[in-house]
Amino acid sequence: MKTSKKLIVAIYNEEHKADEEFKILSSKEKKDELDLKAYTVITKSKEGKTVLHDTEGRDAFWGAVVGGLIGMLVGPVGAMYGAAVFASQVIAGSLAAGVGGGAIAGWLNSEALNVPTDLLKDIKESIHPGTSAIVAVVEDEWVEEVEAILESGSQMMHHYQFSDSVVEKFEEDWDKFENEQNVTK
């Protein structure tokens, strides 16, 4: 059964604050108290250097989506890195997963995801030197709990509900990709 997904971006006015919140999410997920599809931390140093770190999630496909979104926010290197890291973590380091994640990041764009360009612009402008952010894709049943954890310490929150048709299409494409990879092994 397909479920709706929501993009949540929490912006923090300190470089290390997102790391603290990430640890809370990660701990709850490891205890099966949350089920996040994919999430990561972006830090922008006071010198303006953007770093993507602390990636986790249970779904390589949504990790690639997060990687693609990060690419739109911080550039194509972020997309390739994010997609490859998520894919390799979730599918035990498979080379096909890394290549597949990078390929998916290549075709992800705001039109494909139906994420309004104004929202992407707002998110990008929110991540300025000396800040950090958590970017997460969450199933609807977990949104309230995730938002409750992130909202208390965040300076700003951005939200976007992926349409069911986009979720269904992307998940079908990912299933097709995985099946093709299994055939070639």
Image (spheres, helix red, strand yellow):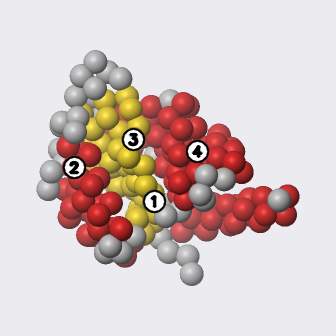
Task: Give the distance between the C-alpha atoms of the residues marked 4 and 2, in whole angstroms.
Answer: 24 Å
Contact flag, marks 4 and 1 (Cβ < 8 Å): no
Determine the residue positioned at 20% across, 64% down: 148
Circle 4 residue: 84
Mark nearer the N terminus (3 vs 4): 3
Out of 15 and 136, give the one closest to the viewer: 15
Task: Give the distance between the C-alpha atoms of the residues marked 1 and 2, in whole angstroms.
Answer: 17 Å
Q: In what element is the residue under mark 2?
A: helix
Label 1 Cα neighbours within 10 Å, binned few <14 / some 14-19 / many ≥20: many
User: Which dot marks residue 162?
Assistant: none
The disc labelled 3 sits on which kind of residue?
His
Mark nearer the N terminus (2 vs 3): 2
User: Which dot marks residue 57?
Assistant: 1
Contact flag, marks 2 and 3 (Cβ < 8 Å): no
**Quadrant containing the C terminus in the rendered view:** bottom right
Q: In what element is the residue under mark 4?
A: helix
Location of residue 182 in the rendering, given as x and y in whole percent from the top left corner: 79, 63
Q: In what element is the residue under mark 3?
A: strand
Mark nearer the N terminus (4 vs 1): 1
Residue extending farthest to the right is: 184
Out of 52 and 92, give the one closest to the viewer: 92
Circle 2 residue: 20
Mark nearer the N terminus (4 vs 2): 2
Location of residue 4 in the rendering, given as x and y in whole percent from the top left corner: 47, 70
Residue 60 higher or lower than 51, as above or below: below
Determine the residue positioned at 35% across, 39% down: 42
Circle 3 residue: 53
Residue extending farthest to the left is: 152
